Amino acid sequence: MDSYEGAWSRILQRAGLAALAWLTVGQFTAVEAQPPTADMLLIHARVYTVNAKQPWAEAVAIGGGKIVAVGDEKDIARYRGAKTQVLDAGGRLVLPGFTDCHIHFLDGSLSLQRVHLDDAKDIPEIQRRVKAYAEAHPDQPWVRGRGWTYPAVGPTNLPDKKYLDEIIPDRPVYLESYDGHTWWANSKALQLAGITRDTPNPAGGEIVRDPRTGEPTGAIKEDAADALMGHAIPAPSRKEKLRAFRAGLKEANRVGLVRVHSAGGVSAAIGDLQNADLLEELRRSGELSVRMYLAYRAEPPTITDAQFKVIEDARRQYHDEWISAGAVKFFMDGVVESHTAAMFTPYSDDAKLKGSLLWDPDTYKRLVADLDKRGVQIFTHAIGDRAVRLTLDAYENAAKANGTRDHRHRIEHIETITKEDIPRFGELGVIASFQPLHAYPNEDALEVWARNAGPERTQRAWAWHSVESSGGVLAFGSDWPIVTLNPWEGVQNAVTRQTTEGNPPGGFVPKERISLENAIRGYTLGAAIGGRREKTEGSLEPGKVADLIILSQDLFKIEPTEIGKTQVLLTMVGGKAVYESPEWKAVANSSTREAK
Ligand SMILES: [Zn+2]
C-alpha cells in the first residue's frame, strides 16, 4: 500500500498537471505574451485557497467558469480587459465553495416546507407552531413536521397523541423527532394508517402503548414502525418535489454549499437518484445551482442483476460536473442510541446487546469486490467498531482481489473505532466521511450516546484528529435533515467539540478536535478527494472551477465559538453568483457606482 504522503503527492501532482495543461493549451503561446482577459476579477480579498503551495492570495481571475489565476493584486490586474467585471471583496475572507459529503437532499428540501420544531422547548410551544402551520397550509392533507426533542415532549421523554388531538382533531398530524428515530402521530393519523391496540409491533420497531389500556399513545419508534404509517401518507407529487428542490438549492447556496454528495434517499420515493430527472429539468432551466453527486442505496439481502443495471445506467446517464451518479451506499449497521450499531463488546448499559450487522458479511464482501471492479465508489454507513472493521476488511479485500488502487471507498459516520483500525484509513486510502455536528455535545443526545458506548469506546468517539494525523482524508458533511445543513456550525464543532455555551469545558474528547484549516479542508479539498473531484474542485487554483464564497467574518481572526454565526455574503458556482446576501447586494451596488 502507498503511504498517505505518496497518495497525496500523486493527487496534488495530477491536479497541478491538469491545471498546467489547461493554461498552456488554452492560453499562452509565449512566456512573455499578454495574459488573456478574464471575465471577472475578484479583488481586495483575503483568499484562503486550501492549496498548500499557495495558501493565501489577494485576488482571483475567472474566465469561462474556471479559475484563470490566483495571486496578488498586481498579478491579477494584468487579466483585466475592457469587458472584465470587477468584484471588490472589501477585504473579506474568501474560501472555496463548500461541499456537503453526506446529505439526503430531497428529504431535507421537503422538510423545509414543513413545520420546524427544532428549538421548541415545551408542549405549548410545539402546539402553537403546529397549529399556526396547519392554518397557514390548509391545502396540505397531512400536517407534517420535524425536529422535536425528547425533553420537550414531557417527563416521559416520549410524545403523546393527546397534545396534538387538543389542537387538531380532524386532520392527520405526523411529526418526526430531531434524530429521525421516533415519530409522533395524532389520533387521526393513527386511524388513517389503521393502527390500533391490536396492531402487532413490526420487527425492529415499536408502536408505543399505554400500559393500562393498551391503546397506542401516538409515539412510533424506529423506521420499521414508521413504515406502517408510510402507506397512509400521500407521496409528494412531482410539483411538490420540484418546489422542494428549488427551495433546497436556495438554502444550500445561502449557507455556502456548491456541491452535495447525496447519501441515498430515506425512502425510494424521495431518493435523490430516483428523482435525478427533476434535477436534470432544473439544470436545463438554468436553476440547478448546486453540483450533485448521487448514490444508489443498496438494500439487503443482495444487489440483483436488475439493480446492477440501474446503477450502471445511472452512471452512464449522469457523469458530468453538475450531476453525476456512480456511487453505491450500504448500511452496515444502525446507531449507538438505539443499541443497533454493531460492536465487538456489549453496550455499557446493557450487557446483552452488541448490535448487529444489516448485511451478511460474506455477501457484502463479494458485492464490494464486484462494485470495486466496475469502478463504482462505495459509501458504507458504519457506526459500531465491528461494522467499521468489517467494512475496512471488505475494502482491503477488494483492492487486493482486483489489483485496484485509489478507488476512494468511504465509511460514513465512524462514531466508534478500535485503536488498530485508526491508521487503516490512511494505509488503505479509505475516505473518512464524518458529520461534525453529530458529535455536538448537547446534553440529551450525547449523554445517551456516551452511556451506551461507555467510557472505553468514548475515548475514540468521532476520532477526527486520530484518523487524520495517521494519514486518513476527512470528508465532512451534515446528514441533513438529521441536523442543519449549515456547515459553519459544523466547522465550529470540529474545532471546539463544545456547545455554543462552552460545554463541556475543554470539549468532548478534546484530543479529537482539529485545526480550523483542517476543518475547512474537510468541507473543500477533503470533500473533493472524497468525491473523486480534486482535479477540478476543492481549492482555488488555476484550472479548477470558479466555485467560491465570500464570508461575513474572518474565521482566522475570531474566537472559535463565533464561527457558527458566520454568514455567507456571496456564493459563486462556475463563475456565476448564485446567492448574494441583502447586505452584500447593498455594498456591491454602491461600489459599482463608485467605480463608474
Ligand atoms: Zn445519512
Image: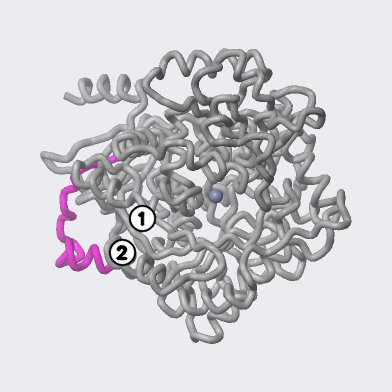
Q: Do the residues labelled 2 and 1 touch (CB within 8 Å)?
A: yes
Q: Residue at 44% across / 31% down in the picture?
A: 112
- The answer to whether 2 appears left or right of 281 in the picture is right
Residue 24 magenta-highlighted: yes
Q: Is mark 1 on a helix, strand or loop?
A: loop
Foreground residue among 473 and 455: 455
Residue 414 appears at what percent x and percent y? 65, 57
- Image quadrant assignment for residue 498: top right
Residue 74 appears at what percent x and percent y? 29, 44
On screen, residue 92 above or below 514 = above
Q: Name the residue under label 2.
A: 19
Residue 558 appears at what percent x and percent y? 58, 32
On screen, residue 495 above or below 443 = below
Q: Name the residue under label 1.
A: 541
Identify the magenta region.
Answer: 19-43
Q: What residue type is labelled 1?
A: Glu
Q: Between marks 2 and 1, how big is the CA–CA gap?
A: 8 Å
Choose the circle earlier in sequence order: 2 or 1: 2
User: For the residue carrying disc 1, how many other residues have a C-alpha within 10 Å: few (<14), some (14-19), or many (20+)?
Assistant: many
- The answer to whether 178 appears left or right of 82 in the picture is right
